[in-house]
Image: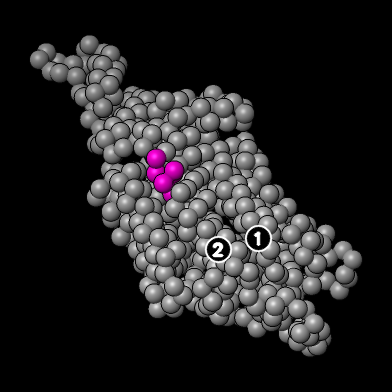
């Protein structure tokens, strides 16, 4: 504040005529009270956190149940179903940078720059989501129907999630407040996965189709009565209605309870930048590349486990009817331990939390690889694995704002890049999801996987164990090695925090200089 105070006293003395000041008197110096740091209330943090639930609830329902819905309820042939799932996943990844580009070009409005995207995409997303779970009367164009509305919903939910993710940078200027809000958000998002699994699983549980013993299709009656099919379709529509209602409620709470805060130094910048120029600057920022590279490997590890968990429980462990309960145990454990990880990263630092939290999954993966089929031990491992899942949920979104702060210090005249940072991180995460899905499908097909079989060949069981245990362990170790190159430790974070605070105070002092004459006249 030295620059601001010196400017004030100098301008005050210069504005006063010499006749006004008596001998021995000193010019009046206007002392500004230091700005109090505005802290987010618990209500603000909760309203912000609730906004993360729609993406997780709908994503969980689609991720675990869309495939069986297409095959057994909509009765789409397997080849067409694979096209719908792969194209939808690929399009979902592409839309993130596209939406990030559009948001970076958006002007500030009365609602902010990000909130209008969240507000106006919600009703359209609800309609598209509901139509995904609707079975049309015609059969010829079903593939096009589901492909259209699946891609449309993924586009609209991206228009919700990318600005919501970038909103982290605009709810507060304080790192500690953003970290705390991120912990609230991660807790609600994990609860969203639990809620999505529970709602969809309980309502449409009767949609499960019987398995085919020894791969012999003649032993199972594939014809179902029209009444039974209709009841199953209605169950999916009911689940879609409940989840759509949750989506709307969360969006309303987010819109009413959170306000964007524009940086004071950003409002004074007039330099506009092309999207691809901003993308080049973002992708040349070393800490960002090292962060997403590390999390790309660890995300791929956890997604391999997630994508093959149902098949592993069903065929390798033999727990066909326990998959949903084991998943709930993992998610519940993750929900409970997220506040613990928030305390841990505050106390010991984020890089330490990465090493401890993500590496804690390795012993449990080794135990799963070595143990025999035991339901009690499996539940214990599931609860313990949730601890590592919580760290994987929390840490990326807690560390991204630090990278953006570091970028702002190195490029102080460049603004509007936050959506690029967040959208491309999500893009790489979804890319990892697509890679894991492709690797899993090709591996199982190569080893002779039998669709809807009551049992699988020994090679398939071994492959599933490799996909759920050995491959994730290797990927986690590679990711942790990359994190050694990540340069922003706790000391660097403190330095960046002080430098940003000085930048904001300098901008605030510059913004107040125009009112010095008015304040002086009022005092005189």
Magenta span dominant secondary structure: helix
**Residue 11, which numbered label?**
none
Q: Secondary structure at mark 1?
A: loop
Is the C-beta separation of discs 1 and 2 under 8 Å?
Answer: yes
Determine if residue 213 is in view: yes
Image height of 464 relative to 419, above or below: below
Name the residue rendered at 40%, 78% in the picture: 376
Q: What residue occupies the far left of the structure in this picture?
A: 24
Which residue is more in the foreground, 270 or 65? 65
In the picture, the quarter occupied by the N terminus is top left
Determine if residue 113 is in view: no
What percent of the width, then of the height, locates residue 408?
A: 43, 30
Name the residue rendered at 39%, 44% in the picture: 480
Q: Which residues are magenta?
A: 476-481
Q: Secondary structure at mark 2?
A: helix
> Circle 1: is it few (<14), some (14-19), or many (20+) Cα within 10 Å?
some
Specify whether 306 is left or right of 80: left
**Does the magenta portion include 232?**
no
Image height of 43 relative to 521, above or below: below
What percent of the width, then of the height, locates residue 26?
A: 15, 18
The span from disc 1 to disc 2 (Cα, nearest Å) is: 9 Å
Specify whether 319 is left or right of 206: left
Which residue is more in the foreground, 473 or 25? 473
**Residue 462, which numbered label?**
2
Report which residue position mark 1 lands on: 447
Name the residue rendered at 60%, 70% in the picture: 243
What percent of the width, then of the height, locates residue 220?
A: 76, 84
Image height of 421 relative to 76, above or below: above
Image height of 438 relative to 311, above or below: above
């Amino acid at each position: 504040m030295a620059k601001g105070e010196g400017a004030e006293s100098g301008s005050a003395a210069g504005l006063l005529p010499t006749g006004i000041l008596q001998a021995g008197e000193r010019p009046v110096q206007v002392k500004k009270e230091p700005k109090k740091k505005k802290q987010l209330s618990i209500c603000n943090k909760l309203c912000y956190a609730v906004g993360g639930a729609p993406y997780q609830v709908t994503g969980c329902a689609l991720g675990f149940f869309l495939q069986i819905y297409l095959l057994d309820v909509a009765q789409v042939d397997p080849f067409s179903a694979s096209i719908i799932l792969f194209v939808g996943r690929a399009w979902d990844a592409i839309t993130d940078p596209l939406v990030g580009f559009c948001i970076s070009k958006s002007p500030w409005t009365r609602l902010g720059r990000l909130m209008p995207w969240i507000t106006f995409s919600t009703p359209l997303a609800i309609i598209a989501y509901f139509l995904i779970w609707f079975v049309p009367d015609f059969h010829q164009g079903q593939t096009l129907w589901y492909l259209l509305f699946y891609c449309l919903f993924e586009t609209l939910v991206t228009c919700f999630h990318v600005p919501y993710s970038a909103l982290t940078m605009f709810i507060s200027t304080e790192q500690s407040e953003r970290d705390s809000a991120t912990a609230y958000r991660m807790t609600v998002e994990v609860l969203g996965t639990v809620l999505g699994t529970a709602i969809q699983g309980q309502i449409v549980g009767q949609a499960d189709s019987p398995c085919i013993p020894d791969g012999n299709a003649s032993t199972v009656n594939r014809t179902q009565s029209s009444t039974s099919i209709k009841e199953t379709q209605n169950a999916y529509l009911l689940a879609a209605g409940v989840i759509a209602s949750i989506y709307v409620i969360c969006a309303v709470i987010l819109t009413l309870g959170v306000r964007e805060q524009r940086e004071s130094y950003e409002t004074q910048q007039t330099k506009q930048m092309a999207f691809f120029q901003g993308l080049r600057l973002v992708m040349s920022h070393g800490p960002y590349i090292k962060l997403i590279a590390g999390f790309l490997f660890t995300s791929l590890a956890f997604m391999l486990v997630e994508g093959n968990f149902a098949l592993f429980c069903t065929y390798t462990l033999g727990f066909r009817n326990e998959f949903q309960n084991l998943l709930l145990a993992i998610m519940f454990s993750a929900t409970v331990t997220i506040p613990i990880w928030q305390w841990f990263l505050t106390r010991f630092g984020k890089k330490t939390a990465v090493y401890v939290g993500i590496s804690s999954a390795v012993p449990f993966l080794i135990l799963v690889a070595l143990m025999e089929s035991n339901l009690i031990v499996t539940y214990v491992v599931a609860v313990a694995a949730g601890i590592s899942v919580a760290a994987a949920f929390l840490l990326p979104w807690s560390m991204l704002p630090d990278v953006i702060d570091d970028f702002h210090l190195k490029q102080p005249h460049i603004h509007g890049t936050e959506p690029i940072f967040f959208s491309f991180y999500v893009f790489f995460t979804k890319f990892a999801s697509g890679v894991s899905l492709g690797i899993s499908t090709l591996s199982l097909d190569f080893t002779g996987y039998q669709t809807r079989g009551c049992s699988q060949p020994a090679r398939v069981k071994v492959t599933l164990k490799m996909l759920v245990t050995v491959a994730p362990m290797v990927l986690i170790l590679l990711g942790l090695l990359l994190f050694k190159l990540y340069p922003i430790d706790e000391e660097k974070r403190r330095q960046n925090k002080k430098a940003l605070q000085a930048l904001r105070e300098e901008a605030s002092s510059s913004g107040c200089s125009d009112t010095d004459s008015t304040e002086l006249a009022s005092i005189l």
